[in-house]
Image (tube, helix red, strand yellow):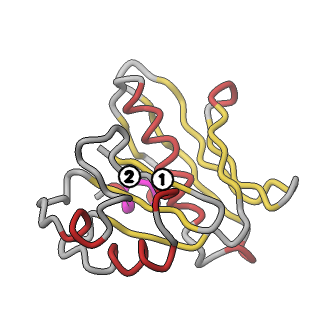
Amino acid sequence: MHRLYENEEITVFWDSFKCRHAKRCVTGCPKVFDIQRRPWIDLSQDENPKIWQTIEQCPTGALKVVYNFGIRVVYEGDTCRSAAYDGERLIGECDYRVTEGGWEIFHTEVLPEYGGKSIAKRLVFSVVEQAEYAKAEVIPTCSYAAKVLA
């Protein structure tokens, strides 16, 4: 399972397949990481620097955090994509199509001047999360999506 949790400043990625339940997140920032709550991560419960420090202690890499740089990622199911916006400007997208086998992610792109900010990863996780909610298999034929989900 892949999830992303966002506030205005940061995005937290969680990959349940990598998680080995070392409990460093729960003990480091218990108000944010509460396994009794759904969703179990609530970024509004503490300050970003403390959340960031806690995630840096994750021994498996199941949790990752990045700054958002003011970029908004929006899932747009009616057009089969997630899209990244800088203000009103479209700066990136992750496109998929619904097939018999599942949701095929076939294209992910971010404008070159926005590279290096994990925007493409946010786009892929947004689509994957929605596919998982829909109980659909994810088929990453886009080389970037395949790399992110490996």
| 88 left or right of 100 in image | right
The answer to whether residue 16 is above or below residue 131 is: below
The percent coordinates of residue 55 (x first, y second) are 34, 73
Figure quadrant of residue 14: bottom left
Residue 19 falls within the magenta-colored stretch:
no
Q: Are marks 1 and 2 in contact (CB under 8 Å)?
A: yes
- Local crowd at mark 2 within 10 Å, few (<14), some, or many (≥20)? many
Identify the residue at horizontal 29%, vertical 62% (top origin).
30
Return the residue nearer the eye: 61 or 101. Answer: 61
Residue hosting label 1: 5
The answer to whether residue 9 is above or below residue 103 is: below
Residue hosting label 2: 41
Identify the residue at horizontal 59%, vertical 58% (top origin).
7
What residue range appears in magenta?
144-148
Identify the residue at horizontal 58%, vertical 73% (top origin).
67
The percent coordinates of residue 1 (x first, y second) are 29, 43
